[in-house]
Amino acid sequence: MKKRLLLLLILSLVFVTCASGCGQKSLLNPDNPVALTLWHVYGEQADSPMNRLIDEFNSSVGKEKGIVITTTLMSNASQIGQKLLDAQAEKPGALDMPDMFFCHNSNAEELGVDNLIDWETCFSKDEMGAFVSDFLPDGMVNDTLVVLPVTKSTQLLFLNGTEFARFSKATGITTDDLQTWDGFFEAAAKYYDWSSGKPFCAFDYLLRSVELNAISSGTAAESLYKDGWYDFSNNALKTSWLQFANALVQGHIVISDLYSNTQVMTGEVAGGMGSSASILYYNDTVTYPDNTTEPMDLQILPMPRAAGGKMLASQAGVGLCALKTTAQKQEAISVFAHWLTDSDRNLAFAAQTGYMPVTYDAFDAIKDYDFNNAAFASLYQTFTQVQQSARILSEPSFAGFYGKTGSLYEALRAKQKDYAKRSAGGADTEQLSEQTWKLFKGIS
């Protein structure tokens, strides 16, 4: 009898939680507001864009309905997962577990899906249809949407427009040639010769370009991986890798020192392949080693695709998670999540941070949005092109995966100048490329 009563109580709480967004009587009371805590990764300064949004919510909808949100931690995407695990385990010195937090799907999986709100119980089917469909699978863990998309980044090609214009005038290479990897590598080789030995492009995340090139050529994404790393018996993976390696060993491209924007802004390279969010760190001018400067005229292009292949794009970024809690708190969380992902607000927030918005209406509104500079306008025009034309794929999220990629980039970074020197001295580029493949296979 007691078990039956407990089951009925649980079901009634679930019903109230789900029904509260469907016209049922609200559990919220402006005279007795419910308090929610939040951890986020959108800037660690007090005046961060997310903190400003929280203040706006508290003074408007929150005040009207009886919800007060307090930010209790500002972290970053690489550290928040461990902080959440420490809080969940109640480790000494750890903060209390927040009601809401931003994290990756791998972090959500570690916290346990059963502990987290399924956003499909908060949003109707029609409301879920407002989100860009490619973004939703990235928030699924065990077939449950526990990570709600709020903003997304993708990898793009950033060009020093002033330098590229000179190069284009001298060689006839245009940005149209950069639509495919074949054209990109031809441009990189010509730039190397034209510039007397400068790399054309620095890559922050080379492997993602290698992966998307292979997938664009026709191979299935899932076939590239095995046991949480890569399947080195996959011929498409090796073919794609060697295409990039051939350019790397000749000095036509490089692995970035850390972030490619620094090398673009100092004139070491003409372009950088990196996260769209790096727009925040590009200056309006280029400062060359001799201290001469000139306007950057930043140009931003989608990642190239395989010749004859489909346009693909990566997606990365955290999303909003929330702990299962009382029916009243879950209603408050649902109110905030709806408010946060409203299309106008979503675009306005994304435009402050260099990220993509996540709803179709927000993307549609880009054409009429008043961006504060030409670089941001270029970025969001490119976002529109990506959303309309590309299949947007999630990045791998295997445990330990990014530690291995970091080891690979560190090893290549240490050897790339020697590869280029040996290539210029007459060494066989195919043999050098095979050496990089061997190095890649040795990472475990």
Image (cartoon, rainbow, N blue to C red):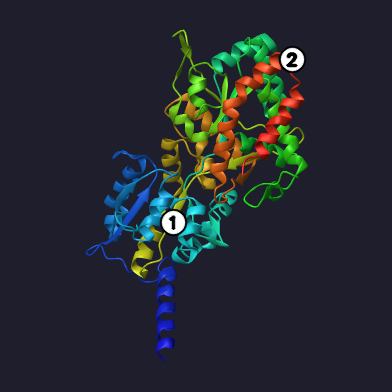
> Looking at the figure, which quarter contains the C terminus?
top right
Crowd tier of the residue under label 1, counting other residues whose Cα lies within 10 Å: few below 14, some 14–19, many 20 or above: many
Q: Residue furthest left?
A: 31
Residue 429 appears in view? yes
Numbered marks: total: 2
Q: For the point 60% across and 29% down, which residue is it?
A: 412
Image vertical order of residue 76 relative to residue 125, above or below: above
Residue 291: image quadrant is: top left
> Looking at the figure, which quarter contains the N terminus?
bottom left
Q: Position of residue 250 (x, y in %)?
A: 68, 20
State the separation of the CA atoms marked 1 and 2: 55 Å
Task: Give the residue at mark 2.
Answer: 426
Q: Is mark 2 on a helix, strand or loop?
A: loop
Taking the image as shown, residue 341 lies to the left or right of residue 91, namely right
The answer to which of 77 and 441 lies nearer the viewer is 441
Q: For the point 65% across and 52% down, which residue is it?
A: 227
Residue 181 appears in view? no
Q: Where is residue 352 in the image (x, y as percent from the top left)?
A: 41, 36
The answer to which of 363 and 111 lies nearer the viewer is 111
Q: Which residue lies furthest to the bottom in this view?
A: 1
Taking the image as shown, residue 409 lies to the left or right of residue 293, namely right
Task: Tell me which amino acid carries mark 1.
Answer: Cys
Q: Where is residue 425 in the image (x, y as percent from the top left)?
A: 70, 13
Crowd tier of the residue under label 2, counting other residues whose Cα lies within 10 Å: few below 14, some 14–19, many 20 or above: few
Task: Give the residue at mark 1.
Answer: 321
- Dot 1 or dot 2: first in sequence order is 1
